[in-house]
Amino acid sequence: NHGQHAFTIERGQRIAQMVVEKFETVNWDVVKTLEETDRGEGGFGSTGTE
């Protein structure tokens, strides 16, 4: 409570919530160049129509 007035919490009132979220640490490998790879014609994220 950052306000100027007192705030009273009564029994049974909800005063908090919890958010469960996955957290991962990423380890990057720094390289000077990238190797060539084969790519499809549909572009990034393309799964086709069939």
Image (spheres, rainbow, N blue to C red):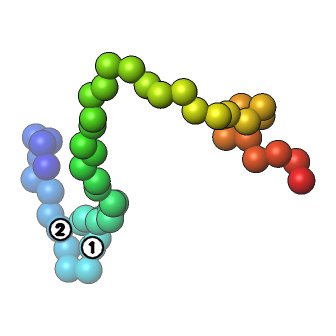
Between 24 and 14, the one nearer to me in the picture: 24
1 and 2 marks in contact (CB < 8 Å): yes
> 1 or 41, which lies in front?
41
Q: Position of residue 4 (x, y in %)?
A: 10, 40
Q: Residue furthest top?
A: 32
Q: Which residue lies under the disc numbered 2?
A: 9
Left or right: where 14 falls relative to 46? left
Secondary structure of residue under mark 1:
loop
Disc 1 and disc 2: Cα gap in Å?
7 Å
- Work out whether 21 lies above or below 34: below
Residue at x 14% of width, y 42% of height: 3
In percent of the image, x 27 and y 73: which residue is there? 13
Per the rendering, the mark at residue 13 is: 1
Q: Residue furthest right?
A: 50
Q: Which is nearer the eye, 22 or 4?
A: 22
Q: Specify the amino acid type for callout 2.
A: Ile
**10 Å neighbourhood of mark 1: few (<14), some, or many (≥20)?**
few
Does residue 33 appear to the left or right of 35 in the view shown? left
Is 25 on the left or on the right of 45, as rendered? left
